[in-house]
Amino acid sequence: MSTDPNVPTNGGGSIPPVKLTRKDFVSDQEVRWCPGCGDYSILAQIQKVMPELGIKRENTVFVSGIGCSSRFPYYMNTYGFHSIHGRAPAIATGIKASNPELSVWVITGDGDALSIGGNHLIHMIRRNVDINIILFNNRIYGLTKGQYSPTSEFGKKTKSTPYGVIDYPLNPLSIALAAEATFVARSVDTFTSHLQMVVERAMHHKGVSFVEVYQNCNIFNDHAFDMFTERGVRDDAMIELNHGKALVFGKQQNRGIRIRNHDMHLEVVDLGNGISESDLITHDEKAPDSYLAYMLARMEYPDYPVPIGIFRDVNKSTYEDLLADQIKTATELKGPGNLEKLIRSGDTWVIE
Amino acid sequence: MESITILDNTELKHIEEVETVTIRFAGDSGDGMQLTGTQFTNTTAVVGNDISTLPDFPAEIRAPAGSLPGVSGFQLNFSNHDIRTPGDEPNVLVAMNPAALKVNLADLEPGGILITNTDAFNENNLKKAGYQTNPLEDGSLSGYRLFKLPISTLNRAALRDAVKLPPKDIDRCKNFWALGLMYWLYDRPLEPTQRWIQSKFKKPELQTANLTALKAGFAYAEAAEIFTTHYRVRRAAIAPGTYRNITGNEATALGFVAASVLANRPLFYASYPITPASDILHELSIHKNFGVKTFQAEDEIAAMCAAIGAAFTGHLGLTGTSGPGVALKSEAIGLAVMTELPVVVVDVQRGGPSTGLPTKTEQADLLQAMFGRNGECPVAVVAPATPGECFQMAVEAFRIATKHMLPVMYLSDGYLANGAEPWLLPAIDELPRFEVKLATERDGFNPYNRDPRTLARPWAVPGTPELEHRIGGIEKEDITGNVSYDPENHMHMVMTRAEKVARIAYDLPPIEIFGEREGRLLVIGWGSTYGAITSAVEEMQRSGKSVSSIHLRYLNPFQDDLGEILGRFDRVLVPELNMGQLAMLLRARYLVPAISLPKVKGKPFKISELTAKMNEIYED
């Protein structure tokens, strides 16, 4: 594996960059999402980023489960596997563990990843398999036509909850962090250059990468994120995380996030009046523990500005490398497998 | 190493030749009965007897000491001739406590040898076993040759001066004392077990303790004036060659490693721990130097899915489980059918439904293997018949899966998995190589192109330039692999998937008939009932009756000549450890009035149960 940080190690090894364009990653299949769906933008950004990353189409596999987002692999001119509901992480783990040279992506949604597939998601994350997970979070079941999802807001009225949702929602980033994810990020479907940056960073990260993308379902949950993503409110309702930079936001860049000393809560403060940037939290995506990332992940609208960017990016040996190491060690120790020796292991005797 | 020579201090004692002996060791699940049985088995195999075993243990790791549910047993049958079953009735029962006696006595043959540990027959243990009076004293065992031995006391006396260990550790050695006694009684050498003790126990103190207990039991039997006779079972006249003792689970694991070598494709085993299949995971995880990757998944579904993922990248994708696990994997098995990937699913069947009898054997997953999925979803089904045969059927499962590009179910069961037999080692260079071809040719490539003979699609794996394609669970257009909801295409694909399975039969060998090619009664079995059925049919044949048997290793598709064979017999009997699942398939497919002999007691058939039914039908 290359040690050059500029060369993607995620599946690509030290493969020299290939001159491909966005078009090379567009398959011949007609895209069948509803017009206006946020999925189009995510697809476009990933197709745009792929050629920049220098990995080959044939070394790339997109794996998905079931749901609107899970149609994604059909539209990528790479290898693809549109599997069954919730199981993409398990299939992707089999793919990556058996062939670590591949760049493996899981495309999933809030229902697919956090409801039916919750178990697989946390276990793929804890194993640190070098797979990039892009979770399209639209806080609704789209393909089954409008039931609430595990990320739907409490009280929300949907087809299956005419009197309002009485389950408390999950926070996807909290789940990923609790499962010890080594890379955790968030972006928004319409923030095209930010989304590209996040996807690129996820790709470069060696180990599991978990990316939540707020994605608008204009049919069953339209405007789900408008209250903080709309152009007019965005600067005051969102905050962009940048490694080594103070947590400053606001149209005038005059507000920030600091830790309240007496109870360890995050608080929003106005800069000035004795409060300067040095009083604010400095973002550290490389922190070995995930406390800060977890606190940031808990910042929710309207109490806090909603964070986007890289929450966590740390290094840890990957599952597939550890597995390969064990095979290497066993082979050095015992010599390459010999069937004759294998079947003769244990007490044998000869009948004349 | 000092070895004990059998000097017959025994002018008093004589050796009697016997042909076949069945012994059952029974005790508390903490008494080490499985270990005792396994040691006796290995030694007996090494001296050249034919042997067959039946471990029978509770699902609880340690049920309360002395209780009936905590009884663990190990039965073995050994002989100077070819045998195929662990024996109907033990000739000898070793009962380490009252509960073991209570649970097992009914099986002991009338007049059989009963060896008991009198130390364990105290008031407390008698009560736990539900005895009002002590059966050792109340005359109720007068129909047996009862030997009352204070095994715990004798073991303590032997070890007291030999080692400095707490009493608890000393008492733990009493199974080796009992084993030593049995070695004398059946004229077995101590060396194989001595070697095992030396390699197993690293602490010198424990090593000495167990070796001393073993020798003490042997010496006691020889010296004490209790046994007047000991028994010799001569070497069996079995086919020449090199043998080892093997259980079905071991043979299954080794067979899959062999399949990987023979196919020249790496093996990827994904599994979730479940009784009685976990030993396959343990065994395969040792053999990483064959490039075998083992993955302990978070659940059964993930194990199946990871195997599918590995198959997508060109590995031999394998998962193993028992019936409840197959139920969980069903949807993903359907995905493998739809994506036409070569995976093998091992089902080591156990008593069901639900959690059922986790440590007991049953064959009740046949219809689940055949039909337990949504939609029209055929898979190939194979079933080994003996522990040793698990090896070649594992190879066969992957030969079929890779040649025909489809999932194969491999049905073992608890009896095969844990039962052991001497295994004639196969000649490695005579095993069938089946070099698997991955697709590389880009001209005319389509993911669902068809091989004209098998209808298999190409195995095009990620990493191959210009063969990028997408597969998935949604119905695909034939050839192109594009998503298709076209009605004609769906019917065509359903029929194609069925036809792919059917065409496996083209390459299958003809069915071997045990006995005459035609006659009065044909007995059909599958899986682990082979030994009992064959022995029972042999007994019928010896008494001059026109009875033949066939044993099916291929359950889907059936071999081509099956229908014709069925037609050559007046009656057809199908004994199964289920309520008649194969019988149902045979009736449906061939319209024959097959008679079912069901048994679902968590135990294999006895030969006598089978001959009784055969006689009944025969006379009918």
Image (spheres, coloured by chain):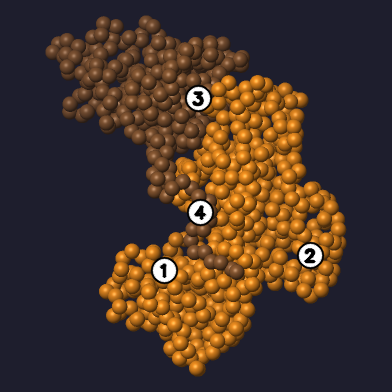
Chain colours: A brown, B orange
1 and 3 marks in contact (CB < 8 Å) = no
Mark 2 lies on a secondary structure that is loop
User: Which residue carries the number 3 mark?
Assistant: A59
Using the image, name the chain to which the residue with label 1 belongs: B
Q: Are marks 3 and 2 on the same chain?
A: no
Residue B515 circle label = 2
Alpha-carbon distance for marks 4 and 1? 20 Å
Amino acid at dot 2:
Gly
What residue is shown at x 16% (from left), y 14% (from top)? A275
Question: Circle 1 sits in a helix, a strand or a loop, which is it?
Answer: helix
Between the C-alphas of marks 2 and 4, the distance is: 36 Å
Q: Which mark is residue A342?
A: 4
Same-chain status of marks 2 and 4: no
The mark that comes first in sequence, 1 or 2, is 1
Q: Which residue is mark 1?
A: B195
Residue B470, percent across and down?
59, 24
Give the SS element for disc 3.
Answer: helix
Subunit that carries the residue with mark 4: A
* Label placed on residue B354: none
- Mark 4 secondary-structure assignment: helix
The chain identifier of the residue carrying mark 2 reads B
Tally of numbered tags: 4
Instruction: State the CA–CA distance, disc 4 to disc 3.
Output: 35 Å
Q: How far from the left and from the top, in percent, is residue B371?
A: 68, 44
Residue type for callout 4: Leu
Quadrant occupied by the N terminus of chain B? bottom left
Labels 3 & 2 near each other (Cβ < 8 A): no
The local crowd at label 3, few if under 14, some if 14 to 19, many if 20 or more residues have their Cα within 10 Å, is many
Q: Which residue is at a point 50% across and 54% down the rendered structure image?
A: A341
